[in-house]
Image: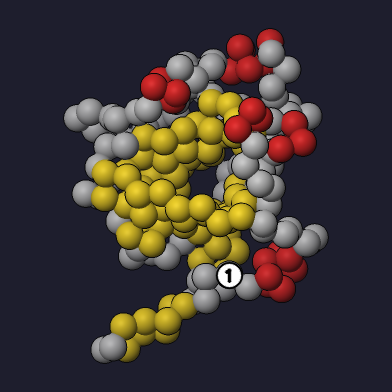
Amino acid sequence: MQFIPTTIHDAFIVEPKIWGDPRGYFTETFRQDLFDAYVGRHVEFVQDNESKSSRGVLRGLHFQAGEAAQAKLVRVSLGRVIDVIVDLRQSSPTFKQWTAIELSEANHRQLFVPRGMAHGFVVLSDEAVFQYKVDNTYQPRAEHTLRYDDPDIAVAWPSHDALLLSPKDLQGLALTDLAANGLLFQ
């Protein structure tokens, strides 16, 4: 397994080694000992989630605030997405910055999203199955959405004929509103 830093402080790509032959392939998708050694501490994942989406679906930018904050390890097992994270940690050297990583069944890459990030993705393939581990259980009252098109962040989403968003995601808050409501991280 190779660990590759991103432009966002504490976020990184996990690139597993693939062993393939004419029958198919084998890969380790997670190793606690290697993961903890790279992070420098133990991260205990307590819940696995999966979503399936069609082309053009944009999910995000979601996060859980306060004690319910979650770190995530995300990957795509079918299809292709552009995965986006935005740093909402006011004390971070990359506060308000974003990065986008392509995750796909072909590249087998995973992205570690530390606590204090807004996270989302847009589907580029006909469909995508998106899987993620989280280090804190889901708390509906703690979930919030950063507006996907907030001009203060200016995420450069891939151009697409029509993005499909849920009503909740269309009502996401701008960064200034999150700050005014005390929803940013220290």
Residue shown at 32% from the left, 52% from the top? 128
Element at label 1? loop
Q: Nearer the viewer, residue 170 or 13?
A: 170
Residue lying farthest to the bottom in this orientation: 22
> What is the count of numbered marks?
1
Q: Is residue 80 left or right of residue 35?
A: left
Residue 115, percent from left and from top: 68, 42
Query: Quadrant of residue 41 in the image?
Result: bottom right
Residue 14, percent from left and from top: 55, 62
Is residue 7 placed above or below 107 in the rendered structure?
above
Query: Quadrant of residue 48 in the image?
Result: bottom right
- Which residue is label 1 attached to? 30
Q: Is residue 111 left or right of residue 171?
A: right
Residue shown at 53% from the left, 24% from the top? 146
Quarter holding the N terminus is bottom right
Residue 135, percent from left and from top: 68, 52
Question: Does residue 80 show up?
Answer: no
Question: Does residue 139 show up?
Answer: yes
